[in-house]
């Protein structure tokens, strides 16, 4: 580990994370935004809109897991060397409760940061008028692609 | 099991599946469409657009897993009683190769159909000019909500 | 939820858990023992022996996951009705660090206790001369088999 | 990929796999044996004994997943360079049916063989008087430890 999980990060690192997130077309398309960037800990928020629903009108599990995956990926990325990029190897998610509310918040947290692989725990909360509830938990494995810039090939 | 996986389904069942899919705001928002509905086997197609990308310009793992999740859910749903609905309990996905190409195709296939729980295998392929490749494999657990209509509460 | 996770349980319930564990031939064969039984929280300990090793001489991932699975199952079972039994639907485990040391300790903790399904988080620690380390984390889905005694059919 | 999955392997490679398996104390302790070694495909068999049971008298999920994990690990290892060793990064398993019968057979099959990571599909079958049934399916991620011998440190 290269520091205590949850501590503040340098502005330059935070900018790098937010720039990379800004290049994720899907996150913009879902209306998701990075809330907080800390060392090994990233939070993403996604307000409800009908475009995010499943057949009962709640958040679709696919959206829930998309922001969980991104939160885990960027949490890992805060601990990677500067000239690298991050890819998801795999993730698993349990959907605990119907994801209904005004917004979802996904928290990705690094549990083990290795040279090649990083393991994160994922949590997704729903904020509703009646309070906050845990709607999903997950685990993700991320890989550090050393020496590979975090930009499209066409943009290099 | 209530029939052989992959056989044709009644038009009424296919309509029920397509209607439910049509109520999934997220699937419309991602530009995904059901390709094929067979007993315990559903295929979903999603053409590439920049709104589905991750930071390198490929399909985001979140979109890949969203259509994989839906394909598994509807594959399970083809084997459920008429007055029930389907929810994802959990899923796990391994991202094998960069998801680049003109379109992704997710295949959900029932491996075990029980009264309460159904287990599916998930595959996602990328179709590109240079051919078709397997980009993700997964497993999902679905639950049958007996006696719960597959519509929003507000619409009943 | 039927109480606060981690609180003390009635002696009768603790006895029921320990009796069931005592009927798990595999746990005896691995030399594993229940350490603690709390509401929704069960700890299992397994001292090292060469019979538990993989090819490098550390604990085999199969043993690590066997006690993690049992810890999750019994954690769930503490919250089930008396005339029921528990089965594992699925679990996922990430092996974070080499599992070497004098003993492993698996902790299963209930995150969501539903009528049919219960979701647990799993942690496995290794105790070694140089200290304690987290060697694995997991998630498990358990199902409550209502009205099914927790004994072999032949013994009823 | 370095050849077609399921084809025959050189005797020297098969010997290397069987020797490594022979060093897994846990596999011997569970009475498990390698049945077949093919390129990217390994089968392990484990006859029933009361020492492998859970509380209802069937095979314990921990034993089922232990042989599934080993089958996946050795399937991956058939495709690794000679001076390397294999470690399980993570695996996930769905238990589909009660694992009862005279023996279990786990099949590990490589789906993607990369330089660093290999992904396998896992299946476990139960052989009983009334026939063969699929009792579990899983997915595993394995890592190739280049330049690390497949033996205990003390034996080098």
Image (cartoon, coloured by chain):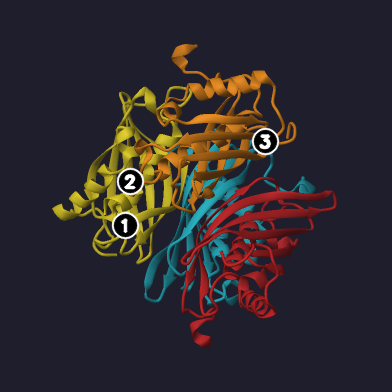
Chain colours: A cyan, B red, C yellow, D orange
Nearer to us: label 1 or label 3: 1
The residue lying at 58 percent from left, 35 percent from top is: D43
Q: Are marks 2 and 1 in contact (CB under 8 Å)?
A: no
Please give the label number shown on residue C85: 1
Q: Are marks 2 and 3 in contact (CB under 8 Å)?
A: no
Residue placed furthest toward the left? C11
**Whether labels 2 and 3 share one chain:** no
Chain bearing mark 3: D
Please give the label number shown on residue D114: 3
Q: Is residue C151 left or right of residue D144?
A: left
Residue placed furthest toward the top? D156
The span from disc 1 to disc 3 (Cα, nearest Å) is 42 Å
Q: Residues within 10 Å of mark 2 (few under 14, many from 20)?
A: many
The span from disc 2 to disc 3 (Cα, nearest Å) is 34 Å
- Label 3: element kind: loop
The residue lying at 47 percent from left, 41 percent from top is: D65
Residue A75 in view in this figure:
no
């Amino acid at each position: 580990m290269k520091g205590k999980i949850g501590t503040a990060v340098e502005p330059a690192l935070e900018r790098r994370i937010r720039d990379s997130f800004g290049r994720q077309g899907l996150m913009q398309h879902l209306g998701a935004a990075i809330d907080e960037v800390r060392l090994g800990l990233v939070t993403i928020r996604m307000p409800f809109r009908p475009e995010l629903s499943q057949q009962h009108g709640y958040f679709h599990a696919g959206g829930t897991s998309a922001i969980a995956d991104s939160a885990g990926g960027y949490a890992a990325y805060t601990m990677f060397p500067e000239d690298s990029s991050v890819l998801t190897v795999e993730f698993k998610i349990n959907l605990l409760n119907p994801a209904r509310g005004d917004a979802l918040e996904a928290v990705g947290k690094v549990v083990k940061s290795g040279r090649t692989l990083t393991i994160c725990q994922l949590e997704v909360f729903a904020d509703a008028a009646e309070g906050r509830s845990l709607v999903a938990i997950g685990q993700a494995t991320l890989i550090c692609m050393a020496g590979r810039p975090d930009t499209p090939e066409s943009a290099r």
